[in-house]
Amino acid sequence: MMPWILVGLGLVILLLSGDSLVRGAVNLSLRLGVPALIVSLTVVAFGTSAPELLVSIKAVQRDAPGIALGNVVGSNIANILLVLGVPAVLSRLHTSLCDSRKTYVQMLVASVLFIALAFWGVFTPDSGLVLLAALTVVMWTMYRDASAHRKANEEALLEELEEVDPDMPYWQIGVYLLLGLIGLPLGAHLLVDNATIIARQFGVSEAVIGLTLVAVGTSLPELATTVMAALRRQTEVAMGNVIGSNMFNLLAIIGVATFFGPIPVEREFLIYDLWVMLGASLALLPFVFGCRDITRRWGVVFVGFYAVYVVAVFH
């Protein structure tokens, strides 16, 4: 029972620490005069994915690379089927009103690149460099496009960034940063070590725990953000959150984690999980290009498919 409690505690610490780090980093960047556009594309993106990144690095260091790879692949599956499915059940997602075609295509290209590299059998620093190079290209195109559309809209962008206080004192910013920097490795340590214990107790692989328990846990921020965006009818936030998170998971998290140790790709990933991830990504095709809404019925279908996937993983 204790490992489950410690896993839960680790998740709570990760989520709170990630939020604290984002608050501190955003406000420090703005106090130092960094444009809000740069903050939104870099600081927030990196900060909100800090829990997944720390978990993957810790897993590699603890000789549990299956958790690292499972966390990324499982999070991407959960982000589409669960993080979009649950809000759609609560409130129809008006995806027909937002244009996410370009970033969606980038996500598909990132997925195909990731799968191609996986068939080498192991993610090495060379693979990591390829993934990080692709991330650099994506970030540049996002910056270029955002600059073209928001040159005169800096104030509106500031309103979109959560917990922004241009007058926040430096000592308070320091507290937020310190809590985040201390809490993230602590939460990752508790989560990875005890998830490994649970895997051994139940006789399942570390990859399975990474694909399910760890993946869903580290996807909770995206789920909370998307539910609120759906209830506020901010569909572009919901879709953009999922697509951006998936790209960052594939390109940045594994890209960085490879420099802390090799990440072998188990056979199950190559014959099943990676293709489920790609299939879930392709499931968004009619909604992105066909100008269709994700209705409550489709939300139920997405959540149902995720439940079937989890059952299949454990069998």
Image (spheres, rainbow, N blue to C red):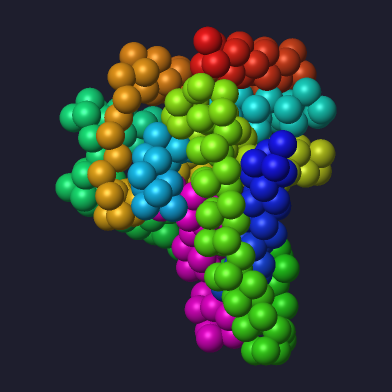
Front residue of 129/121: it is: 121
Magenta segment: does it hold 50? yes
Which percent across, then down, holds residue 166?
A: 68, 82
Exactly how many numbered labels are in the figure?
Answer: 0
Q: Is residue 225 above or below residue 122?
A: below
Q: Residue furthest bottom?
A: 170
Identified at 54% across, 53% down, the residue is 188
Q: Name the chief secondary structure element in magenta.
A: helix
State the residue in front, 265 or 150. 265
Give the percent coordinates (x, y) of residue 155: 66, 71
Q: Is residue 192 left or right of residue 124?
A: right
Residue 244's spot in the image, x, y percent?
50, 45
Q: Is residue 41 visible?
A: no
Q: Position of residue 100 (x, y in %)?
A: 52, 37
The residue at 40%/15% (across/down) is: 272
Q: Which residues are magenta?
A: 28-57
Residue 37 forms part of the magenta stretch:
yes
Report the residue at 60% width, 77% height from top. 178
